[in-house]
């Protein structure tokens, strides 16, 4: 539903969220700010104890809408158009139990508290619902088995090198797990994969195997994380057993590092990690320079340090950790949130399809990732539902500037560029992940299937315009308010066959994604969806 006033159009978007668009300007344009002086000062750091109720536990929600809950949602009031996405789009987690949340049902004074339905826990999804032999779990098993085999041999005295260099094995694992979570490194890996394999003559099996591996590198990350702790414990036990070969300082630092590895609180894990990295430098330097015979550090010099592999491994870990912060910058943004349930954040500069970005008010404290919609020309936008303290703050106190990371990171949608023909299936507001593929040239011939409810009323003219004007058969919109609820899995299979697609990529709720992937694979069509592993 749209209402026009001068050159401003107000319309309702996903599930009742309304906002304004200037109809005679680019939707990606960033208008000039007139009242920057009235904006509150930004902060580099917000300490955990200064964040008020933000220390409450909120699940990191997916922005994918569940079409099958549309009717239920209408009873509880409007829902946000987009919810914040987690670390990587290919690794979305299902919702967890939330505290009752106020829903506006009428006037400002008329409020009712509606409990949110409890969903399956993330752990149950990972361990049980995904099956026992997923690529993620196989990668975890392989790396964990190799580490444990080496550790057992070292404990048994049959692997003397590992016995003497247990701490080095721990650092190797830390390096690998850091690589598997380095957005800059993975962006390079994704780019190289698309460049190398995104050719018509490359076998489809090689492309799908690469996609499965890149989507599941979190299994390597988790395995190396557990293994690094095991190696460090063994190194510490062995050091205590042979304490005459180590100084009290080395033992104390190793113990401190081990204790910091168990700190996983959302508000402190970054600082704990930085502290552990600093202590790791102290540990490798002291270990390299300590002489047990003289019980001194007389051997500590630059030439000796340069010959220690632990120094170079730690240097690589440090560079990978620092690299994202080199690209951090404060940019001007335009934030509109007339509905109070969501905000539209506009940035200058185009972004290639399939990438995601992170934003922050206080870069040393927290970062939030969102999908990006862009024509890769004038600018790009993020849509954030007011579901947490940060996103609610965008509505109540819209900033004129935000901190961003200069390097946008790649997820599963980016790998669409590697294929020749692809079908992209989205339900509800999950369409945002694929809109960029319609707005800008793409190496793959894509067909977009969108299953949603009341397109005109809930999404308005701007989204409808983005979905319009394409060749016949390229965009399929199934409006459940008009045509009823379809079997999305059958629709995906039928469309993939007609489009002669090499791959199907789906964004939906866990059950919906799983149904589409299983149905397509049952027909011999490669298919991928969020694996919900973190």
Image (spheres, rainbow, N blue to C red):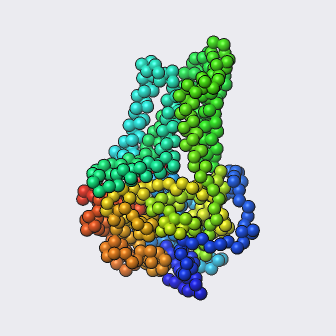
Res 471 quadrant in image = bottom left
Where residue 222 appears, as percent x and y from the top left, is 47, 42
**Residue at 58% across / 66% down in the picture?**
347
Where residue 90 appears, as percent x and y from the top left, is 44, 54
User: Can residue 434 be seen?
Assistant: yes
**Residue at 42% across / 35% down in the picture?**
144
468 relative to 190, above or below: below
**Residue at 25% across / 68% down in the picture?**
498
Where residue 428 appears, as percent x and y from the top left, is 44, 69
Q: Residue furthest right?
A: 37
Where residue 362 appears, as percent x and y from the top left, is 66, 55
- Report the front residue among 308 and 506: 308
5 relative to 528, above or below: below
Q: Residue furthest top?
A: 293
Count of numbered circles on the image: 0
- Report the front residue among 528 and 514: 528
Res 403 quadrant in image = bottom right
User: Can residue 342 be seen?
Assistant: no
122 on left or right of 451 = right
**Residue at 63% across / 12% down in the picture?**
293
299 relative to 466, above or below: above
285 relative to 489, above or below: above
């Amino acid at each position: 539903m749209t209402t026009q006033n001068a050159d401003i159009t107000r319309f309702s978007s996903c599930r009742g969220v309304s906002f304004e668009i200037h109809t005679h300007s680019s939707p990606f344009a960033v208008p000039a700010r007139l009242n920057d002086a009235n904006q509150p000062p930004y902060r580099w750091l917000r300490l955990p104890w200064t964040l008020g109720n933000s220390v409450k536990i909120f699940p990191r929600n997916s922005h994918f809408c569940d079409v099958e809950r549309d009717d239920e949602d209408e009873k509880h009031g409007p829902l946000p158009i987009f919810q914040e996405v987690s670390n990587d789009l290919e690794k979305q987690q299902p919702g967890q139990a939330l505290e009752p949340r106020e829903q506006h049902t009428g006037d400002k004074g008329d409020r009712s508290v509606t409990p949110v339905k409890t969903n399956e826990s993330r752990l149950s999804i990972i361990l049980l619902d995904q099956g026992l032999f997923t690529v993620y779990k196989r990668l975890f098993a392989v790396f964990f088995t190799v580490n444990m085999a080496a550790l057992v041999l070292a404990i048994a005295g049959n692997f003397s090198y590992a016995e003497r260099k247990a701490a080095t094995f721990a650092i190797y694992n830390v390096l690998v797990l850091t690589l598997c979570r380095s957005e800059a490194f993975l962006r390079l890996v994704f780019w190289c994969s698309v460049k190398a394999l995104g050719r018509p003559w490359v076998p489809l099996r090689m492309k799908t195997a690469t996609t499965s591996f890149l989507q599941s590198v979190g299994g390597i990350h988790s395995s190396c994380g557990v293994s690094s702790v095991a190696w460090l414990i063994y190194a510490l036990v062995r050091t205590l057993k042979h304490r005459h070969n180590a100084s009290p300082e080395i033992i104390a630092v190793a113990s401190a590092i081990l204790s910091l590895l168990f700190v996983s609180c959302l508000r402190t894990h970054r600082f704990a990690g930085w502290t552990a990295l600093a202590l790791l430098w102290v540990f490798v330097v002291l270990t390299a320079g300590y002489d047990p015979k003289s019980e001194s550090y007389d051997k500590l010099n630059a030439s000796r340090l340069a010959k220690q592999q632990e120094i170079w491994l730690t240097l690589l870990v440090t560079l990978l950790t620092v690299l994202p912060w080199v690209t951090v910058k404060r940019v001007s943004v335009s934030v509109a949130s007339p509905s109070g349930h969501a905000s539209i954040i506009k940035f200058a500069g185009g972004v290639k399809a399939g990438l995601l970005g992170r934003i922050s008010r206080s870069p040393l404290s927290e970062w939030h990732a969102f999908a990006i919609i862009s024509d890769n020309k004038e600018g790009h936008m993020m849509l954030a539902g007011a579901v947490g303290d940060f996103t609610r703050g965008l509505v109540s106190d819209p900033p004129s500037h935000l901190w961003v990371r200069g390097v946008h990171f790649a997820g599963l949608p980016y790998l669409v560029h590697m294929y020749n023909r692809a079908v992209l299936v989205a339900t509800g507001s999950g369409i945002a992940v694929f809109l960029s593929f319609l707005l800008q040239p793409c190496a793959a011939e894509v067909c977009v299937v969108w299953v949603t409810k009341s397109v005109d009323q809930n999404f308005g003219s701007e989204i409808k315009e983005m979905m319009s004007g394409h060749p016949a058969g390229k965009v399929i919109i199934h409006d459940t308010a008009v045509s009823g609820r379809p079997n999305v899995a059958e629709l995906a299979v039928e469309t993939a066959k007609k489009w002669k697609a090499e791959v199907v990529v789906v964004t939906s709720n866990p059950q919906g994604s799983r149904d589409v992937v299983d149905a397509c694979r049952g027909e011999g069509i490669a298919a991928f969806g969020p694996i919900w592993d973190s």
